Image (cartoon, rainbow, N blue to C red):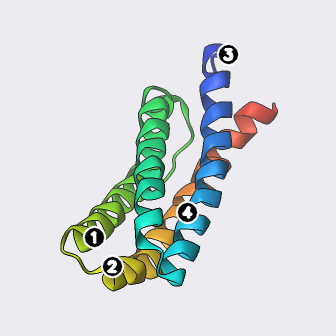
Amino acid sequence: MDNKYYEVMKRAVELSETVLEAMRQINTKLNEGSYQQAIPLLEDVMKACLSIDSAVQPIMPNLEPNELESLSEKLRNGFDLVVTAFEQGVPAKAQEIMQFNLMPSYKKWHAEINRVLKPHILS
């Protein structure tokens, strides 16, 4: 793999770790009923995921077969559902979607990012 992608892959893996922590924080805030504190974090997490996704797109053809595209789509759908629940003023539904849909989707996506990119940055 081309060396110019090394930084992109390294940053994607690092950012995906940071996002995992932020997702856990959002989950905690929602469980505590601190919905207003969870929303800005959620926005940051969505931007970070889009950023990782965009950064990885140009190198996708050079990577081994993976599930990143389908997992990214599931992740986007999960974000949409959470945002819609907030917009509809049903934070309990947002919390439920976060816990049972978005968090598991993120963990799968995060694991796939690591599985696919880490070997390239460790070599």
Compute the Cα span from label 3 to label 4. 31 Å
Q: Label 2 is placed on what type of residue? A: Pro
Q: Earlier in the sequence, mark 1 or mark 3?
A: 3
Contact (Cβ within 8 Å) of mark 2 with mark 1: yes
Compute the Cα span from label 2 to label 3. 45 Å
User: In percent of the image, x 74 and y 32: which residue is there?
Assistant: 121
Quadrant, the N terminus: top right
Tag 1 residue: 86
Tag 2 residue: 91
Mark 2 or mark 3, which is nearer to you?
A: 2
**Residue 8: x and y, percent?**
60, 26
Q: Label 1 is placed on what type of residue? A: Phe
Q: Secondary structure at mark 2?
A: helix
Q: Earlier in the sequence, mark 2 or mark 3?
A: 3
- Residue 3, which numbered label? 3
Q: Indicate whether 74 appears above or below 16.
A: below
Contact (Cβ within 8 Å) of mark 2 with mark 3: no
Mark 4 or mark 2, which is nearer to you?
A: 2
Q: Earlier in the sequence, mark 3 or mark 4?
A: 3
Towards the viewer: 29 or 65: 29
**Residue 32: x and y, percent?**
54, 82
Q: Earlier in the sequence, mark 2 or mark 1?
A: 1
| 10 Å crowding of disc 4: few (<14), some (14-19), many (20+) | many
- Residue 23, which numbered label? 4
Compute the Cα span from label 1 to label 3. 42 Å
Q: Secondary structure at mark 3?
A: helix
**Residue 98: x and y, percent?**
43, 74
Q: Earlier in the sequence, mark 1 or mark 4?
A: 4
Towards the viewer: 5 or 83: 83
